[in-house]
Amino acid sequence: MAIDPRQLSRLIFDPSLTFLNKTRTLFEFQVGNNPVYRRFAKHYISTGKLPESVGEIPLLPIRAFKECDLITDGSVQELTFKSSGTGNMNRSRHHVADLEIYRQSIFREFSRHFNSTDYTLLCYAPGYSDNPDSSLLWMLQYLVDQDEQGLSRFLPLNQPLKQSDLDEAVQHDRQIILFGAAFGLLDLLDLDSHVLPDGSHIVETGGMKTHRREMSKSELRKRLSEGFDITQNHIHSEYGMCELMSQLYAIGGEWFDTPGWVHASVRDPDDPGRMLDPGVEGKVAIIDLANIYSCPFILTEDKGVMNEKGQLAILGRWHSAALRGCNFLIDRD
Amino acid sequence: MIISNMDHKIDELQKAIDEWLSPDNYRLKDAIDKTVNEGLFSFEDIKYQILALKKTLKKGEFNRWAKYSGAGSAIGKQRLTVLSLHAGNLPLVGIQDILAVVLSNHHYLGKLSRKDPYLPETLLEILKKRGLIDGKWSVQLENLTGGKGRADALLFSGSTESVDPVIDALKQYNLADSTTPKLVRTAHYSIALIEDDRPLTFRQLADAVLRYGGSGCRSVAMVVAPFGLKNKKCEFTDYVEEFWLKNPQHKKPAPSLYHRYAYNSALGVEQSWLDDFMIEETDLQPAESFILHWIEGDRETLRELVQKYKHSLQTIYVTDPDSKLPDGLPAPEMLSDAQQPPIWWRPDGVDPLKWLGNLSSVHGK
C-alpha cells in the first residue's frame, strides 16, 4: 500500500511510535519515492525487504547533497537551503518540500530546552534577508518571529553588545539567549561588548569560516564564559547543517542530545555499516526523520564520538588518515 | 670512520649494494621470509621491488645523482644528524632517503616503519659495516635518543595534517622540534595520459595502477584517456586480471569501497567493480585507496587536472616519449617506469640529496 506523505509529517513527531517503526516507514517511503536512495539502498537491502534495526539502514554519503538533487518523486520544493561557500565552490543544496516540518522540528526541540515565553533571543548573525540560502538564519528568523512580545531580534554586526541592547529584556523580566556562530561571538567580545545579565544563556552554532585559528570547544566555552560573565552551565551548543531539518543541542556542555525523531551514531570510516562503541572516534551518522522528502539517512564527514548515555560529541571534520601514497604516521603500539 | 671522498664512497656503495642484493645474502632472504610470513608485504611485491632496485642501483646512476645534486661539493662540510622517518606503504620505500644520507655524508638516525622493519635493516647493516653510514635505527623512537641525539634535519613523507603530530612525538623524545629543518613530501598519487589502447599501454597502465595495491605515491590514481570507461572497461579488466594472476593483491579494500560503489551507482557514475579495486569515471581528487579515476579527455584535460591537483600530485606519465605536453606542466616520465624510478628521481620535485647538501652548506656557514 502506498504511503501517504501527509501522514508522515505527523508520524515522525509521534512519541507513541518507536523510532525503529518510524524509521522503517520512512525507509519504505524513500525506497519507493527517492530514486537516488533506492539505487543506493538496493546494494545493501533486497528490494521489498525492510531493515531489522536502525543500524542496518544504508547511510547515504552527505556529499549527495552537493552532487545531485535529492527530492522524492511528486514533491515540490518550497525553498532550497544551501551550505555556506562562495563563488564556484560546490555547495550543498537541500530542497525543502514542506517548511512546516522544519518549523515544527525547530520549535519542538528548542522548546524542549528553553521555554520560549521566558526568553528574549538576541542573534548575532546576518539577517535572513542578507542570506536567504541559509537554513541557520531561517531558523533564527523563525525563532525571533515566535516571540510574541517582539523583543527578540538580530543584533547589528560589527558593533559591541551594549547595555541598551539588554535593557528591554531585563525590564520585561525575560532572560536573554544570545545566539551566534562560535567565532562571531568571540568577535563580539573583541568589540568590547557588555557582559550579559545574570541568568542569560549563550547558544553557539558551531564553526564559521574565519581568519581565526582553530580553537578547542573547551577553550571557546571558557572564553565566552569569562567574556560575557556567565557560568559555563549556561553556554550551549547547537549542531545543525543545511543538509538536516533538525538540530541537536548540547546543554551546558559538549555532549549533544538528539530530538526524538533523530538518531545519531558514530560509524567506522572503513565500514560505515558498523556502529562504533562509546568512546571510539569515527564518522558521525545522522538519521533525521524530518528529512522526509530529501533523505533522512546520512553519513556525514564530521568526526565524533558517543558516550555511554547515547550523547554525541562533535570533534571536527573527518580527515582521512588512510591517504594513498607514502605517508609516515608515528606507529601506535 | 666514514668514507668522505665521493668517488671512493660511490665505489664502496656499489660494492655494498652488490653484496646486499647478492643471491648469497641470507640475511636478506631471512628478512624477506619474515616480512612475508608476518603478512607485511606479499612475496611478489618484495621480489618486484628487489628486481627494480637491482636495475636502478648502479654506479653510473649514483654518479649521475651526485653530479646533478652537487653532493660532491657538500662533502667535508659540517656533518649533521638527519632523522629519516620511513613510511611503510611499499617494501623498502625509504631507500632513497637512506642513500641520500650516505652520499651527503651526514649522520643517520632512522625510524623504521613497523610495516617494513626487516628489509631496510639488512641494507643498513651492510652500509655500516663498509663505513658508509653511522648512526642508529629502530622501529621505536625512544631507541633513537642519546648518542648524537637531537636531529639537525628531518626527512619524511606524509600529509600536511600529519606534520604536527609527528613533531609532537619527536619533541616528546627530544629528537626534534618545530624549528628543525624538514623535508616533508606530501604528494600521494600520480596521473597518466594514455593516447591509445594497445595491449602494451594497457599492461603498463595496469602495472602502474595496481602494483603494491596502488599504495605508492608513484602509483597511478588518475588516467586521462581518449575513450570513456564504458567503451574500454571490459578490455582493461582483462589486463587487470592478467596482472593479478601474476601479482595477487596483498591488501584488500575496506567495506567503505563498496559503500562508494553503491553511492556511485545511485548517482549513475560510470564505474567498474573489480572486487579488490574500483574504477570510476570521475575527476574527483583521489583520496581513497583502491580507486582509479578514469577521465575521458586529451592533453588539455591533463593540463587542467594537473593544475587543479598540483599540491597532491606526484608524477605525470605518458606512453609516447615524444609527447608534447601543454606549456607549464612538469616534465613527464614514461608510464613503464612508474614503479621502478631511477634512484635520482625527485619526490615532490625535490631532490633529497640536493636538499641535504644545501642544508650542509647553510650549517657550514
Image: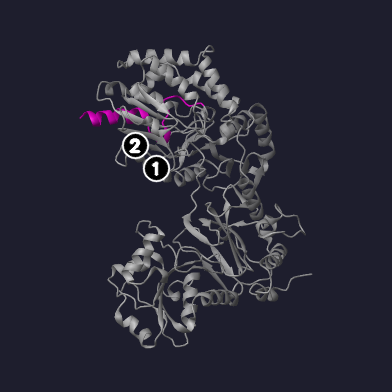
Q: Name the residue under label 2.
A: B182
Q: Is residue A267 above or below residue B170?
A: below
The secondary element bearing badge 1 is classed as: helix
Q: Which quadrant: the N terminus of chain B?
A: top left
The local secondary structure at tag 2 comes to strand
Q: Is residue B344 one of those drawn in magenta?
A: yes
Q: In which quarter of the image is the C terminus of chain B?
A: top left
- CA gap between label 1 and label 2 equals 10 Å
Q: Quadrant of residue A299?
A: bottom right
Q: Name the residue under label 1.
A: B163
The subunit letter for the residue under badge 2 reads B
Residue A304 visible in image: yes
| Residue bounds of the magenta highlight | B340-365
Comparing A238 with A313, the one in front is: A313
**Percent from the top left, x then y, of residue A307?**
53, 58
Residue B9 rendering spot, x and y as whole percentages: 35, 15
Residue A20 figure quarter: bottom right
| For residue A173, side relative to residue A298 (left or right) | left
Identify which residue is drawn at 48% across, 29% down: B93
- The spot of residue A169 in percent (x, y) is 38, 84
Tag 1–tag 2 contact (CB < 8 Å): yes
Residue B47, can we see it? no
Question: Which kind of residue does numbered mark 2 sit on?
Answer: Lys
* Residue B5 in magenta stretch: no
